[in-house]
Image: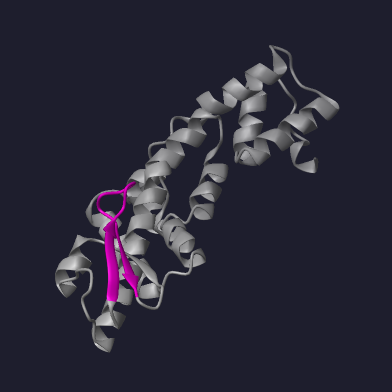
């Protein structure tokens, strides 16, 4: 198999395009070029051609990982899912994720802490934040440490109740809607009842809503 062209990308100096006589254009990095001593016009054996294709697939997975992680934080599980959706092989997915962790571009612990900070600032309770950690694929063993950074629940829930009630005690339908809203935000019945009690609401029948 003959390598027809080896051209450096204009957009990314770390990326090269290796064009084979079959018309294939493979993305490769300097490591693939060095490993196979690539240059335009080189004749590749069948084994070298397959090695080049494999190297290209691995390089593409790593390059895509960097691009994805440069736009936003994500968990390892989310990154692996994105790469899988693009057709990357499982071995390349694992290698790419491992590399991202080594260079610090992927860090589930930091990501978990960022999720907790983001949702707690928006007034969400522990229950909803835990759902977000699960939905985003953060490893369960990291949840406890991240959630330990939550501020006192009373401050967040009181702020929500205060904005909604404006000093008055809720009654009837308004109380039900307020409870529903707080439940959606991840607060427990106990937390909701305690918060409403602080605003003079009758909470004896609250479980009946």
Location of residue 19 by image quarter: bottom left
Query: In which quadrant will I find the N terminus?
Result: bottom left
Q: Is residue 113 magenta?
A: no
Residue 146 visible to the viewer = no
Foreground of the two, 64 or 111? 64
Q: Is residue 59 above or below residue 190?
A: below
Q: Main secondary structure of the magenta part?
A: strand
What's the residue at 53%, 47% (across, down)? 132
Residue 156 x, y percent position in the rendering: 54, 26
Foreground of the two, 49 or 139? 49
Location of residue 3 by image quarter: bottom left
Q: Is residue 19 magenta?
A: yes
What's the residue at 46%, 30% (across, down)? 152
Q: How is the image coloured?
A: one colour
Residue 61 x, y percent position in the rendering: 37, 63
Q: Is residue 105 above or below residue 43?
A: above
Look at the image and give the residue range highlighted in magenta. Answer: 3-20
Residue 79 x, y percent position in the rendering: 42, 57
Residue 95 x, y percent position in the rendering: 30, 67
Q: Is residue 1 above or below residue 70?
A: below
What's the residue at 51%, 54% (across, down)? 134
What's the residue at 67%, 39% (across, down)? 183
Foreground of the two, 182 or 102? 102
């Amino acid at each position: 198999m003959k390598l027809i062209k080896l051209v450096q990308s204009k957009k990314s100096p770390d990326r090269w395009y290796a064009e084979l006589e079959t018309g294939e254009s493979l993305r490769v990095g300097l490591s693939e070029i060095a490993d196979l001593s690539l240059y335009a016009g080189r004749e590749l054996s069948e084994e070298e051609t397959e090695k080049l294709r494999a190297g290209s697939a691995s390089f593409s997975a790593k390059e895509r990982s960097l691009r994805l992680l440069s736009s936003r934080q994500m968990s390892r599980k989310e990154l692996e899912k994105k790469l899988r959706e693009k057709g990357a092989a499982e071995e390349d997915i694992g290698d790419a994720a491992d590399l991202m962790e080594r260079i610090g571009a992927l860090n589930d612990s930091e990501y978990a802490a960022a999720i907790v900070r983001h949702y707690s600032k928006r007034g969400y309770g522990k229950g909803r934040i835990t759902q977000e950690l699960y939905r985003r694929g953060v490893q369960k063993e990291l949840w406890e440490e991240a959630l330990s950074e939550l501020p006192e629940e009373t401050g967040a829930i009181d702020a929500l109740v205060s904005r909604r009630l404006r000093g008055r005690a809720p009654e009837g339908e308004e109380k039900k809607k307020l409870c529903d809203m707080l439940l959606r935000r991840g607060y427990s019945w106990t937390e909701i009842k305690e918060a409403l009690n602080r605003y003079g609401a009758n909470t004896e029948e609250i479980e009946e809503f």
